[in-house]
Amino acid sequence: MIHIEGLTKYYHDFCAVDHISLDIRKGEIIGLLGPNGAGKTTTLRMLTGYFQPSSGTIRVKDFSVSENPLDVKKCIGYLPESAPLYHNMLVFDYLHYVAGIWGYIDDARLSRIRKLSDLCGLEDIMHKTIGELSKGLKQRVGIAHAMMSDPEILILDEPTSGLDPNQIVEIRKIIKEIGKEKTIILSTHILSEAEATCDRIIIINKGKIVADGSTETIRRSQDSGSTITVTLKNALFPEVEHAMKAVQGVRDIHKKPSESEDLLTVAIACSDDRDLREAVYTIIKNHPWIILEFHQESTSLENIFRNLTMEN
């Protein structure tokens, strides 16, 4: 549905987006992740036709963004990070105005407003002035605006930025509901949001794509393995470290903070997909150590993100 090839954007001598190439399929919910300044917003603005790329091509369906910008914009609904709302208007009046811009008249206009009000949970605030709304409610109005033309593609730039946990959950529900019928691209630096909302994650750093795929695909591609956390009594770290490093597949072991000085908590990093819990337990059983805690978890997306985007 969207084909991007060699996309590049320079601001004078600074390269904000550096030869990005990717394909986005119809019906995907894509999360574009990256630290501040990574090039996320610039990429979205080029995709929507607001910025012209320095080089490279973007095709949306059968249209080129540079050659057919109006045709592309008809396919896309776009909500920037700061929703461009008229704060002195009532919610209903604002949506009525936006619907008129898109050519809706009479019953069709009211029907479209009613549908978006239901989708975005605006029924109880239609009579309120936009300026008196919380940021979360303003974001809902902004999403309704972006969806007014019933676009095939919805692009959201940091849709949950600055929202409280309850508002984030509400916006997430709206995005997932829209994603049942639309292709969605959203940028975020909140990793939990990307995991909870998106089918596919693209991590960008310094204008380049450094990872692309589902959460599990990215974990496997980074050879992240898993981590076994163990809390022991009557154990000294040098002895535990020496014993655990003898297990094939253990990549590293380090101390973690413990509840008291009498306890030792260690994190054992496993380098592959093999389950090493039995081998680790066997070693502990053969020593005078008492197990107080023992659990395994996959390496978090947060750690992978940090490794991929940290300054060299």
Image (cartoon, rainbow, N blue to C red):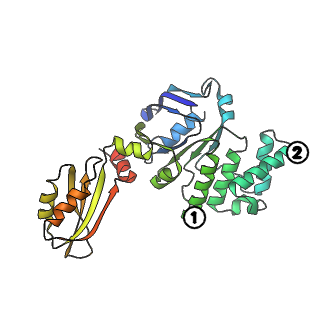
Residue closer to the observer: 90 or 26: 26
- How far from the left and from the top, in percent, is residue 164? 55, 63
Marks 2/1: CA–CA distance: 36 Å
- How far from the left and from the top, in percent, is residue 214? 45, 43
Which quarter of the rendered picture does the N terminus lie within?
Answer: top right
- The answer to which quarter of the image holds residue 48 is top right
Specify whether residue 36 is in view. Answer: yes
Residue closer to the observer: 25 or 20: 25
Per the image, the residue denoted by label 1 is 166
Per the image, the residue denoted by label 2 is 106
Label located before the other in sequence (2 or 1): 2
Residue closer to the observer: 14 or 84: 84
Residue at 59% over, 61% down: 167
Neighbor class of circle 2 (other Cα within 10 Å; few <14, some 14-19, many 20+) is few
Relative side of 115 to 236, left or right? right
* Vertical relation: 71 (above or below) 284: above
Neighbor class of circle 1 (other Cα within 10 Å; few <14, some 14-19, many 20+) is few
Element at label 2: helix
Element at label 1: helix
* Vertical relation: 79 (above or below) 233: above
Question: What residue type is disc 2 on?
Answer: Asp
Specify whether residue 53 is in view. Answer: no
* Vertical relation: 24 (above or below) 302: above
Relative side of 77 to 304, left or right? right
Relative side of 176 to 196, left or right? right
Question: What residue type is disc 1 on?
Answer: Asn
